[in-house]
Image (spheres, coloured by chain):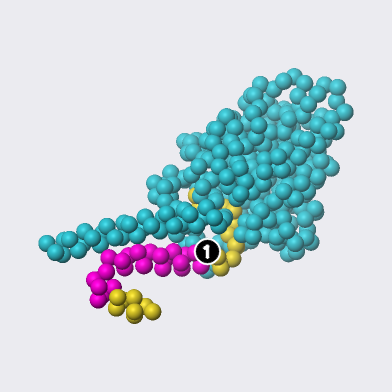
Chain colours: A cyan, B yellow
Amino acid sequence: MEKKIKLFVLVISVAISLLAGEVFLRFYFDRYQDYDIEMWRYAVKLKQSVDDNRSHIHIPGSKETLMGVLVIINSKGLRDKEYSYEKPEDVYRILVVGDSLTLGWGVNGEETFSKILEDRLNDQNNISQKYKKIEVINSGIGNYNTRQELVFLENEGLRYSPDEVILAYFINDAENIQKEINNFWTRRLILYAYIKSVKNRISFVVDEEKRYNVYYSDLYKGENFTKYKGILESLDNRLREDNIRLTVVILPEFHDFNNYEFDNIHDKINDFFSEKGRLVIDPLYMFKGSDSRSFWVAKDDPHPNAMAHKLIADAILKEIKVFSKK
Amino acid sequence: MVSEIWYYLKKYKRWWLLPLILVFLMLGVLLFIGQVVPIVSPFIYTIF
């Protein structure tokens, strides 16, 4: 009997200890930012699973402070002001499709390159009699790849009847992993999430093949890239069906601008879309040779900060051909 | 210090404190590793 009591007390002690650890970590990460934990909070608070190939969408009407910035999701699941699906006749509408860089991870909504573009294009809007206003809709969703972006366009994006789609292309868009966010323990326990996070960090250091430069390069080799080009074809064809202009903006990889290892990948994407007659804008030249970390959102987060978003918008503005023939 | 803690737990039969000590030791190690491991991960490995 005494043994049973001791066992019971031990079990309770372990449970309380884990609970104390959970509470401690919640207070700790409320005070000290950690990129993985902020991503966990993004997944738990702002995302929900869907059964189609998108795997997840934003929860409409949700909001959360992430990386010190308030992220508000509108009623249609986008991090932007409200736009009706029906496009007014005198509006030229651009839909920007992309992932967390497009979403504006770590920057205020109005500091994203989409919103800067909208403001600056409207300031310059003196060249069309047909259009009185230009809308640039930010439809960026974190962790999306091109496959998911294509499904988003088909299920949701094209409902906005855009005149133009800007595909904000990032180097990891070629991967085919869709994250499941329905794991019971991951969604509810920060302790579990953080253990997973640290385990992953250790594996990145130990396993060279998992490092970003090796991983990204492998996405564009051989059979991987051949399969991926099929998705790019599908996206291009789908927009062509509706006579929608496509502009591709190749966002730079922000880890190291002094030793940039992905020029050949930029070239591959540039060549693919240029051969199809699409405008390709590559803002990399704005950043090469600079101190990469000066463009990071935080010391442990190489997402582009507000200054980087501004430079991306500047690069787009130099080349985008709004109102011209498709 | 470890031996002193162990002595205290054993002498005063506070063995039920051991899980708490171990959990917070584990947290300390995790937080230390989280701080010192460099960011070399690609965005793809957003694990959530």
Query: Which x, y percent locates residue A176?
Result: 55, 47
Q: Residue at x 50, y 57 (%)?
A: A28
Q: Residue at x 42, y 51 (%)?
A: A189
Q: Mark 1: give few (<14), some (14-19) or many (20+) Cα within 10 Å.
A: many
Query: Which x, y percent locates residue A236?
Result: 68, 36
Q: Nearer the viewer, residue A157 or A245?
A: A157
For the C terminus of chain A, give its image quadrant.
top right
Can you identify the residue that label 1 sits on? B34
Stretch of the chain drawn in magenta: B9-32
Q: Nearer the viewer, residue A175 or A70?
A: A70
Chain of the residue on which disc 1 is drawn? B
Q: Amino acid at mark 1?
A: Gly
Q: Nearer the viewer, residue A3 or A255?
A: A3
A90 relative position to A300: left or right: right
Q: Residue at x 87, y 28 (%)?
A: A126
Q: Which residue is most to the front?
A: B12
Q: Which residue is most to the top?
A: A89
Q: Nearer the viewer, residue A300 or A225?
A: A300
Q: Main secondary structure of the magenta part?
A: helix
For the N terminus of chain A, give its image quadrant.
bottom left
